[in-house]
Amino acid sequence: MTSTKRILFVVFILIFLTGIAIGLIGRSICTRDNENYQKVQVELFAPDEIATVLHDEDLHQIYVCYNDASYVNVYSEEGRFLWAVSTPYLRNVYFELSNNQLIVYNSADAYIYDSSNGTFVEKKKSDDIDLIYDWENEYTDKFQNGEFYFDTYQVYKAQEDGSLTTVVARPWWYWVFNFGVCWCVSFVGAIGMGTIIFLEKRKEYRKTQKAIQPSKHSIVIENRKARFILKYFRITSIIHVIYAVLDIVFGLLLNGILCIGILPLAIHFIISNIVIWNMLDHIRLTEDEQTIIDYWKVCEIGTFIIAFLSVIVAAMLA
């Protein structure tokens, strides 16, 4: 590996680790486990994404709800902060306005507050309440006058002319800690590292190919088991690439319906590679044959990583 490639490889490693580190820091900043849930809270300022926004037309209040923090900031329709509530950490939290009550809940527990002022009412089992388990967060590009809309960090009010006025604003640097952005940064680092490793293995592969069969494009490996493993690496690499492409396309067109496919793909990848790598440990290969096998092994691992990362991209698109 040349000195330039070594430097680039280190840079991509740092990019990869930085994306993961900042993403985890962002999650830790956002996540709350409030045991003092019976009291009204101060306004939440954390780079947590808005899960949904509820609107009570009678009280003229909007409820800005945050998932990771299990937190609700409440504002007037003009964007003036009024009060907030926060529960202990709830996984997969939902928010609902019902019968003059604000309910923060998941499949197990529900925390009920007076929707007018945040006074704690009671804690109940979710099964004991008629809940809808849904968010009002469907995308629209048609805005109705007086209605409220939101994106990742901002809340807007639609005007008569169809424009949007920002009601609740958060600073731009929140995007630095955005989990999706951090994953994309790590994705760039991973792709960079994988590309450099692939190019090096490709260089060794081409060199070996020419040395063994200068007049042909294919490589003949004598060992029968090694030939089987080589075919396995090639076929699975193609499958991973096809899945990644289709996953992103379906994420854009069909709400990420193929994302679940990564589970059987991952199970197959783990189990089959344990078997294949164990077989390789018991096969005697020449140095040139080992180079060829190593190249396609890198291809298979690299394409699986691409397939895995395609799930994140597809989920974001969906």
Image: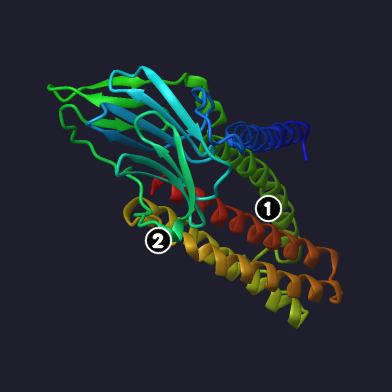
Q: Secondary structure at mark 2?
A: loop
Give the mark, 2 or 1, whose residue is nearer the N terminus.
1
Q: Amino acid at mark 2?
A: Ile
Residue 169 in the image: x percent, y percent? 40, 20
Q: Residues within 10 Å of mark 1 (few under 14, many from 20)?
A: some
Specify whether residue 238 is in view.
no
Query: Circle 2 sits on which residue?
Result: 257
Q: Gap between marks 2 and 1, in whole Å? A: 34 Å
Residue 2 placement, left or right of 64: right
Q: Secondary structure at mark 1?
A: helix
Query: Circle 1 sits on which residue?
Result: 202
User: In this figure, which colouring scheme has been used for the structure?
Assistant: rainbow
Reply above or below: 146 against 202: above
Specify whether residue 258 is in view.
yes
Closest to the observer, 69 or 214? 69
Q: Residue at left 75%, top 31%?
A: 7
Residue 241 in the image: x percent, y percent? 52, 59
Q: Residue at left 27%, top 34%?
A: 56
Reply above or below: 103 against 251: above
Residue 60 placement, left or right of 71: left
**On the rendered image, what quadrant is the N terminus found in?**
top right
Task: Give the farthest residue toward the bottom.
Answer: 224
Q: Amino acid at mark 1?
A: Arg
Closest to the observer, 265 or 6? 265
